[in-house]
Amino acid sequence: MEQPAALERLLGNTSTISDLSRQMRRRGVRNVRIVGHGSSDNASSFGIYAFGLLPGWTALRDSISLSVYYGAELDYRESVVLALSQSGRTADVIAYVERARQRGAFTVALTNDVESPLSAACEAVLPLAAGEERSIAATKTYTNQVAALVLLAAFAGGVGEEYVTGIRETAALLDAWLPRIESEVASLTDVLTVIERMFVVGRGPEYATAREISLKLLETCRLAAEPMTATALAHGPVAALDASFPVWAIADDGPSLPAVLEAASRARRAGSIVVASGPGGSQIPGAAFLLPVPEPPLGLLGPILSVVPGQVVAWSLSRAKSLDPDRPAGLSKVTCAA
Amino acid sequence: MEQPAALERLLGNTSTISDLSRQMRRRGVRNVRIVGHGSSDNASSFGIYAFGLLPGWTALRDSISLSVYYGAELDYRESVVLALSQSGRTADVIAYVERARQRGAFTVALTNDVESPLSAACEAVLPLAAGEERSIAATKTYTNQVAALVLLAAFAGGVGEEYVTGIRETAALLDAWLPRIESEVASLTDVLTVIERMFVVGRGPEYATAREISLKLLETCRLAAEPMTATALAHGPVAALDASFPVWAIADDGPSLPAVLEAASRARRAGSIVVASGPGGSQIPGAAFLLPVPEPPLGLLGPILSVVPGQVVAWSLSRAKSLDPDRPAGLSKVTCAA
C-alpha cells in the first residue's frame, strides 16, 4: 500500500540519479555489474533490460561467489557496480564491492540505509528511500529498486526526464488501482491453498517479476513456485505440468507477448490452471484467473505494476494458510552469507 | 554410459580448441557471451567460472531475448560469442549469432553437427563430437559442453595441456566408476517416487550441475526440482522446506563447501531429507542418501563427474514412475523459439 508514496520519495532523489548517470558516462562504463541476493537479485534481472535497451550497455547479474569466494581476478575497469541491499548490511555484497572498487570499478550502493556499511564501502550512494520494511519479505524496496535501475539507465541513455514523468504517472496508476486488486484475489487464493507447486512465467523485463512473485510465494506461502522464462518452459519443464501444477503467466504488450501466449497455451493443453497477469494479461486465452494491471505509460515501467498482484496474492494466501507473511519460518531480516 | 568415450572424442579436437583460444586472445576479448537454451544454458553457468578463474575474463549467460526480440544495440566488439546447441538448429540462437557477428563479435558454434545452420552462421566451429543423442534429454552433450568450455578457458589462460590431461583422467575415472553409481541409486529412487518437489543446491562451478540435475528430474520424472545456489536457499526459500520437500546438495572441496554444508544443515533442521553428492558429498552431515563421486584431478573438472549421479537417478526414477525417459510428454528434440 505504501508503494506509490515510496516511488514518490525516490523521485525526490532525481538529481542524485542524474548525476550518477553522468559519472558513469564520463568514466566510460562498458559493463554494468549488478549484485544482490534474494529480491535484490530479482530486480537485477530487470536491470539487464533497462541498461540494454536505454543506453545500450551490457549489464549482468555478476557472480558474488566467483569474486569473493573464488578470488577471480576480473578486469573491473570500465565497469560500474550497482550493489543492491535493502539493509546495506549483506556481508558478501560488501566484500564484493570492496574488491571491485580496489580493482578500478565505479561502485554505487542502492540501499535504504545511507549510513550502512555498504554505503560506506561504495564510492557513491543512491538512497532508495523506500522507508522502513517492517516485514522480512521486502515489497516497496523491490519496486523502488526497479524504479532506481530504470532511472539510472534512462538518464544514461538521455531520456531521464521522460522516465521521471513516467514513474510519477505509474505511482498514480498504482495508487488508484491497488484497492481493486485486493478485491480480485480471493477466488485465486482459495485454489492456491491446495496447490504445492507452480511455475511463474515471464519474459524480457517481466522475467524479473516472475522471479519476485515466485520468491514471495515460496518464502511466505511455502508454495514451490519456480520462475521460468517463457522459452525455458518449452525446453523440458512443460513435460511436468498437469492439473495440479498451475502456471502463472505474466504478459506485457512488448516483443515478449507471442512467447508468453505460446507458453500459456502449452500449459493449458497440459491441463494446467493458468493465471494471467501483467499489462498484457487479458490477451492470454483460456486463463482461469485474470489479475490484470493497467498499461504503463512506458513499456519498461510495466514491472513496477505487475509485481503487485503477486505480492497481494502472497499476503492473502499466507494468511489463508495460517502462516505469518511478515515472519517466514527460519528467516531473519539481514541474511548473512555463510 | 557413452560419456567417457564422448569426452575422448572431444579431446581429438584439442588443436582446434587451442587455435580458437589463440584467436580469442588475439582479438582482445573482454566479454565472453555464452548463449543456449535448456541443458546448453545450464552448461553456460559453468562457463562463467571456467573463464572467470582461468583467463580471468568476464563471461555471462547473455540474454537472447534482449538482442533478438527487443533489438538492444549492445557493443559486441571485444566479445566472443559461444553459441551452444546440441543440434545446431535452435532458431533464436542462430538469430542471436547473426546479429552479434554483424556487430563485430567473434562467433563460435559449439555443436554436435558441424553441417548445421548454426555452424554456417558462425565464424568458427568447435565440434562437440558427443555423437548421436537418441533420447530427447541430452546427457553426453552436456558433459562435452562443460569439457569444451573448460578447455577453451584453459588454453586462453595458458594451462591448456594440464586440462587436456585432466579431462583424460576424468574420463577414465568416470568409466571405472559408472557401474557403481547404478547400483547405488535404487533406495533413493524408491523414496523419490512419492516426492513432488525438491531443491537442488550447488554453488560455484557446481551450480551448473544443480541446474542440469533439476532439469533432468523435471522433464523426465515430472518432479518439480528447482535449482538454487546455497546462498539463495537462505534468502527465503528455506522457509518452504519440510519432510516432504527434500534437498539434494552438491558439494565440492573448493571455496563453496562451507555454504553448501550450511545449506544442508538448515535443510535438515527444517525436516528435509538430504541427498548428498559431488566430490565433497561425503562431508555433508546428516544426509539420508549419499551419491559421492571421486575427487577430480583438477577442481574445475568436478562438474563433469557430479552430474552423472543425477542423470542416473533421473533415468531410474523415470522408469520407476512408468514414464519414458527418452520421450518426455510434449517435447521434441529441436526446440523452436515461439
Image (cartoon, coloured by chain):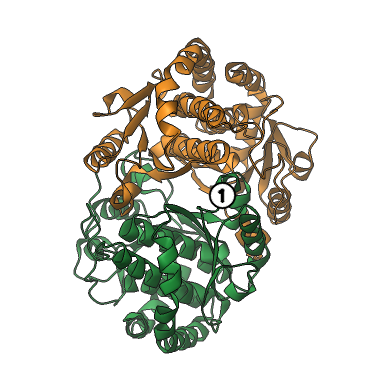
Chain colours: A green, B orange
- Identify the element where label 1 is drawn: loop
Q: Position of residue A287 (x, y in %)?
A: 59, 67
Residue at position x 70%, y 50% in the image: B97
Q: Compared with residue B213, is residue A163 higher up or lower down, i.e. above or below?
A: below
Position of residue A153 measured from the top left corner of the image (x, y, whole percent): 49, 72
Q: Residue at x 72, y 42 (%)?
A: B334
* Residue A150: x %, y % from top left: 47, 73
Q: Give whichever of A194, A133 is nearer the camera.
A: A194
| Quadrant of the rendering where the C terminus of chain A is positioned | top left
Q: Is residue B165 left or right of residue B71?
A: left
Q: Describe residue B120's horizontal placement relative to residue A270 as left or right.
A: right
Residue A316 occupies quadrant: bottom left
As shown in the figure, which amino acid type bears the numbered disc 1?
Answer: Leu
Residue where numbered disc 1 is placed: A241
Q: Is residue B93 left or right of residue A184?
A: right
Front-most of residues B144 and A133:
A133
Number of numbered discs overlaid on the protein picture = 1
- In depth, the one of A25 and A232 nearer the eye is A232
Q: Is residue A198 above or below residue A325?
A: above
**Dot 1 alpha-carbon crowd within 10 angstroms: few under 14, some 14 to 19, many 20 or more:** many
Can residue A123 be seen here? The reply is no
In this orientation, which residue lies closer to the viewer: B30 or A137?
A: A137
